[in-house]
Structure formats: C-alpha cells, structure tokens
Amino acid sequence: MTKLSVNVNKIATLRNSRGGDEPNLMRFVHRVIALGAEGITVHPRADRRHITPEDARAVVREVKTVETNFEGDIREDFLDLVLECRPTQCTLVPVKPGEITSNHGWDVRRWSFLLSPVIARLKQEGIRVSLFVAAGDLDSIRETAAIGGDRIEIYTEPYAEAFQRGTVDQELHKVLLSSEEAGRLGVGVNAGHDLTHENLPLLVNRVANLAEVSIGHQLMSRALDVGMDRAIGDYLRAAHGRAPRP
C-alpha cells in the first residue's frame, strides 16, 4: 500500500510570514500524524523561507511513530543537518538558485561523481536515500541503481498538468516505464509534486510498486477549502487507491 508523507513546508511558510510561532509547526505535525499520515517530509532550503534547521531537528526529535523524510540538495550545511538528525529517508533534489519550488530531476549520470559519495555516506548512517528524477529518464534510474541509491522519487508535475488537461496517457506511460525499470533494478519508487486527491488514485492503481507519495502544497490548499481533517482523509483515501468522495 502506498504511504502518504505530508510535506509541512507550507505551515512553516505561513508562520514565517509574520514571525513568532503561529501556526505552530509541531502542533500541526502531530495533528496530521494523529489523522493517519504515514510520514512527515520537510525541505530545509538555504534561504530558510519555510522549514528551518531548528524545525528539522524538532521533527526528528518528536516524531517517533512514522517515517521522516528530509528533502534537499547536496550543499554542505544540509548534508551536515541530515547526518546530525538521521531521518528515515533523505531525498536528494537538484536546486536552482531562486526557484520557487523543485521543478526538475537529477541528470544522475552527469552528477554521479558528486552523488555517489553522498549516497554512500548517508547509507553508512542507516539513512535511506532517494533521488528526484524526471518521469521517463531511464538512464538516471539505471545510474541511481549503479551508485547505490535506494529509491527514486518521480517528479509528477507533468503528469498532474496532463491529468488536468485530460491528456494523461503519455505522461502516465513515462511514470510506468520509470517504475518498471526501477523495479527491475531493485530500486524503490516514490513520487511527488502537484499530486491531488483527484489525480492520485489513477497513479496509485497503475503503479504497483509505488511505495510513498510526498504531498504538501496541494494538500494544504485542499485543507483551506475543507479543513485539515477532511483533507488528510481525502489524501489517505487517494493514496490507498480509492476515488475521491463526493
């Protein structure tokens, strides 16, 4: 069954917009876990515009019943934080200066000389390592396996956009090719970016080896419409392959 890891960056963004400690990040972390979320994801960026290193430390200190996932690039201070905190999983994501959000996967073959020693060091500490890759980039999936990556996270914004247009077949096919190649190589499969409670059931039901989805912005947007309790319930239902409730 696909696990739902809730990305809580947007809670921190709202808090940081006014300073102080409201909304309190850890209060919401514990709430979404109580509502059934099966993981917590944070992405401590260099500019600290949402999750801070102190937030990341609080997450691993207080979250004991579900997995924790740190997303980030291979800059030194992020890797030091990961090694200090030892989350369940580290998802390595390429970052461009000034980007609003992550918007492309690794060219793993090109950057393997940097990624390979990072993966090895993290795995020495018992941290599962996932690499963010574009759907259909089979070369990057093969290289991920070659350098010891445990999982890939398939970048799903193109799939989500195609679903919205009603022309999803081609992008879904890319996701399926990626998941099949990863499975053949013994690499686990995660997915994330712009997944909604409407487009997620199709993905889950077609990708048999989808271990985890990481969802933040769309889930928090849904919560503004229907409340956090209903939003978490909608996404858990979707992650488990069931159609949206009316």
Image (cartoon, rainbow, N blue to C red):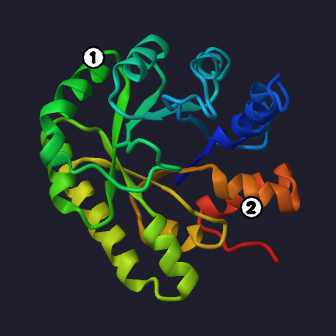
Marks 2 and 1 close (CB-CB < 8 Å): no
Give amino acid for label 1.
Answer: Gln
Residue 17: percent from left, percent from top: 76, 36
Residue 183: percent from left, percent from top: 26, 56
In the rendered image, is residue 236 in sight? no
Q: Please determine whether, in this image, residue 182 is positioned above or below residue 55.
A: below
Residue 79: percent from left, percent from top: 37, 21
Q: Residue furthest front?
A: 98
Residue at the image position 65 percent from the left and 72 percent from the top? 198
Residue at the image position 41 percent from the left and 32 percent from the top? 90
**Image disc number at residue 187:** none
**Image disc number at residue 234:** 2
Whole-angstrom CA distance, mark 2 to mark 1, is 37 Å
**Residue identified by numbered label 1:** 124
Q: Secondary structure at mark 2?
A: helix
Q: Secondary structure at mark 1?
A: helix
Q: Residues within 10 Å of mark 1 (few under 14, many from 20)?
A: few
Question: Which quarter of the figure is the C terminus placed in?
Answer: bottom right
Residue at the image position 68 percent from the left and 18 percent from the top? 62
Give amino acid for label 2.
Answer: Asp
Question: Which of the 4 quarters of the picture holds residue 222?
Answer: bottom right
